Image: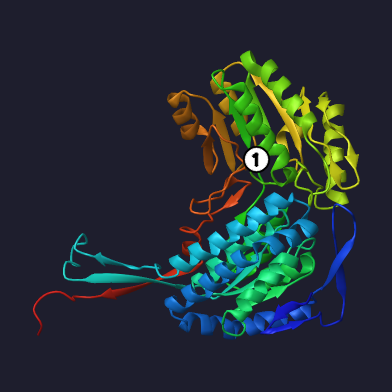
Amino acid sequence: MDMLIDGGWTGASDGAVDPILNPATDEEIATVPRATAADVARAVAAAQQGRDAMARLPSHRRFEILESVARRIEAHQVELGRLLCRENGKRIGETTGEVGVAARIFRGYAEEAKRIFGKSVPLDAIPGRERSLAITLRQPLGVVAAIVPFNYPVELWSHKVAGGLAAGNAVITKTPEDCPLAVLEISRYLEEAGLPRGAHQVLTGGRDVGEALVRSDGVQLVAMTGSTAAGRRILEVAAPTLKKVHLELGGNDATIICDDADVADTADALIRGRFTSGNGQICCAVKRVLVHRSIHAPLLEAVVAGAKRLRLGDPMDPSTDVGPLINRRSAERVEAQVNQAVADGATVLAGGARRGSFFEPTVLIGVSPGTPAFAEETFGPVLPLIPYDDFETALTLANDSPFGLQAAIFTRDLRRVMRAYEVLDVGTVVVNHTTAVRVETLPFGGNKGSGNGREGIHDTLEQMTKVKTLLLHEIFGPAN
């Protein structure tokens, strides 16, 4: 498959390509161009014309384009889900569902394109300004660089590209290296829906492509989902140009299980939230489980039994519970983290073994606060259960992290819920449900090392627009 630059599907300027492998089989399923610095420069130059055309495009037309893409995604949901499954490795039910979510996201931004409102501000609160008025408009930023991760590429790209276009920007997408194919296919729908030339372009390739976009003077906003290390690097590279940077980064989400939680329901939620959702590769997956000591033993028994029942295998098989990680390197990284946890005193009660790109659902006990297995993000199906005695101690442990994306609490006690909501330094507190949840109409994002800003149908447009004010001096009163 080719990439999209200046209205045309093209290879790299030097002809270089990268293979795209099925992580379950290592089969090559396609090749894509490896974009060069010249390709990036060409795309950024074309985006300058695209941004002007998008700024002139009325909101009803932006609505029509995005709505038509949503309908086309829905019409091709099954084949897109199969394509995403083959390149990404998530279970076929998950990838098909992700495509459906993307259609909803496109439709949501289509509607919001008609609701980018300014406001009027009476100035009579200011002495001497009683007869004056100000009005504001929200205008496009210009060119948005959308840097997309591998774990939920279609869904997370949809927020960036549909949000950027709904706001009247031009968008340049940098696809994930391992799984760009479904994004490229839906980009065809966008291109055929009537966007102005250069309004949306897609570059494939490595980190150097992303860095070149971030460094460019012709880009006004970088919207990136990825690792915290990558986010820090983007901030460094973007600093000289003073462009806006919106980052949704890693997480080490804590789940607090109180003594009144239902053991069976909680165990099911933990298994879904850590093992069977995204094969454990989710920024907001269940990462650290803090369990009241009174129910630690029965909950541990239920989680271990559930983990051992899970079927590891071909993600295209509907009976599979857990597929491969995105590539062998990722599985080897998870293996090394588990081995380090054991060396630090942890015990493996289920799983713990790697087979190629597959890693068994793994349950750990004996993980101590402060060790890497507690403090660092493990991007794979590994679940540590840690007992606690006092609720306030659990809150302190939950906050003892450089990350602050989401947290969950399982309890029937509303006062505990509100206490957790008050003190946990995270973007979202989830009650009686796994942290591995994202609702496109809610603000999503974190604090500390988990990023800045919030992404969602009602929030992204604020990130992707700028405010312009008109001050009307002495506008009220009798005319001269």
Crowding at label 1, few (<14), some or many (≥20) Cα neighbours within 10 Å?
some
Snapshot quadrant of residue 30: bottom right
Look at label 1 and name its amino acid: Pro
- Residue drawn at point x = 9 percent, y = 85 percent: 480
Query: Is residue 367 toward the left or the right of residue 328 in the image?
Result: left
Q: How is the image coloured?
A: rainbow
Q: Relative to the observer, which residue lies in front, 81 or 210?
A: 81
- Residue drawn at point x = 70 percent, y = 16 percent: 297
Q: Is residue 321 above or below residue 383?
A: below
- Residue drawn at point x = 88 percent, y = 35 percent: 353
Q: Is residue 67 above or below residue 367?
A: below
Note whether residue 127 is visible. Answer: yes
At mark 1, the secondary structure is loop
User: Total of numbered circles in the picture?
Assistant: 1
Note whether residue 228 is visible. Answer: no
- Where residue 181 sits in the image (x, y, percent)? 75, 67
Residue beneath disc 1: 402
Q: Quadrant of the N terminus?
A: bottom right
Q: Relative to the observer, which residue lies in front, 360 or 448?
A: 360
- Where residue 398 sits in the image (x, y, percent)? 61, 31
Q: Relative to the observer, which residue lies in front, 413 or 147?
A: 413
- Where residue 263 sits in the image (x, y, percent)? 62, 22
